Amino acid sequence: MTATHAAGRKLKDAIFDANQACNEAIKIHGADAVTNATIGVVLNEEGKLATLPTVEKVFRSMAFADMVAYAPISGLPAYLDAAIDLTFADNKPEGFIGAVATAGGTGAIHHAIANYAERGDAVLTSDWCWGTYNVICVETGKRLETFKLFDDALNFNINDFAIKVDALLKKQRSLLVIINSPAHNPTGYALSSDEWDKVLDVLKAQASTGKKISLLVDVAYIDFAGEKNSTRAFMSKFGGLPENLFVMIAFSMSKSYTFYGQRTGALIGVSSGAAVIDEFKNVSKYSSRAAWSNINRGAQALLVKLTADKDAQAVYEAERAELYQMVKRRADVFVAEAEACGLRIVPYKGGFFIAIPADNPAVVCKRLHDDLIFAVPLKLGIRVAACSTSFEKMHGLAEKILRAMR
């Protein structure tokens, strides 16, 4: 009974499938015996969801009406201002900036793909990527193509990026590029300042030919990548770009505020042209009305209230830093032990996940089930969630993965 364009669609999500298998094993063997390296949320050392006390305190102190009333379609103005300030910190680029509230970071990505890639055209991202990019492309009548994120020496592959951009723009009048950095999902990689310069040089050269270029930067995990301003320093490079090179940033409250299920984010646009930002806000508002009308007012009001209280904001940042350090300690163990035992991993710079290249990821992950270890099989390898794997269980994990691969 479906329309022809929807016929046969069936979502298969490797992440949630792996997590479901893990939860079934926990029911049988108990949580202490099982290693959950699947899910993209921070679990504490006892395997329970880690939350931020100050976020909960502020949320519970809010008036009920603030949580349940409608919000404007584009979002509460004060929320949008806060999202912009938090996204850039001290690295706000020169130019015109606008924002629209979205249903999490996923909603921001949806709006960018829906409005800045022509139907039937390709959207470009890296071969190691979050699979939902492809789901959104299919849903909106686009297709996802990829460039090789790493060269043979596991350095950022600027050459393949440039080749793929050029090839697509020989066939298309416009192109949307998605780059997830820092704390890339699923690898934990982050582009250096020099690598960002090279990416922008490639895109500016194409823009000089009159092509329309849009760049979406997915920063969902940025607050688990390192010091606030150092991880955002690259954003100042987005100022003064040609008007036909438009930058968007997908902001999310999910990870930074342990507010995963409240589904609150924003799509932020940066341009040297005021008309580009006016158009951006108009088309994004239109898409919001069509997709979800308006989003969670309570989460927006929480962010406004929290950022307005400097004392509470400072306590919150300290609490979040503790979570970041907990995840970092776990990742440091895995990286060190991988090097010691000879397990080849993708360069990890920070964030929730570590990636291991593998020829048969599904087979390796199934073999790991014998040790009650659950990770996520991807097309190019295996994703290990440092965010959900306890410090104790991280010890020895690299060697067990190597043994399963052999």
Image (tube, rainbow, N blue to C red):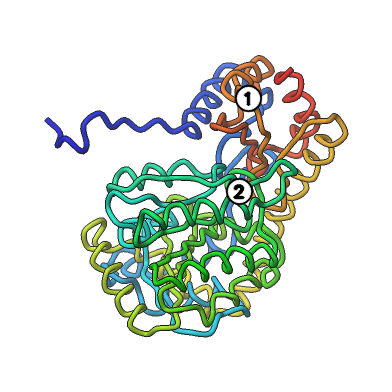
Of the 4 image quadrants, the one containing the N terminus is top left
Name the one closer to the observer, 199 or 325: 199
Please name the residue shown 69% across and 55% down the image: 324
Find out whether the residues at labels 1 and 2 contact each other: C-beta distance under 8 Å.
Answer: no
Query: Residue beneath label 1, please?
Result: 359
Name the one closer to the observer, 295 or 248: 248
Relative to 370, does residue 143 appear above or below in the rendering?
A: below
Give the CA distance from mark 1 to mark 2: 34 Å
Report the residue that reaches farthest toward the right. 340
Relative to 202, does residue 154 appear above or below in the rendering?
A: above
Q: Secondary structure at mark 2?
A: loop
Does residue 254 appear to the left or right of 351 in the view shown? left
Query: Residue beneath label 2, please?
Result: 50
Q: Secondary structure at mark 1?
A: loop
Relative to 214, does residue 330 appear above or below in the rendering?
A: above
**Lower sequence index among marks 1 and 2:** 2
Please name the residue shown 63% across and 24% down the image: 359
* Mark 1: amino acid: Asp
Report the residue that reaches farthest toward the left. 1
Name the one closer to the observer, 213 or 18: 213
* Mark 2: amino acid: Ala
Counting from the top left corner in percent of width and height, residue 105 is at 44, 57
Q: Residues within 10 Å of mark 2 (few under 14, many from 20)?
A: some
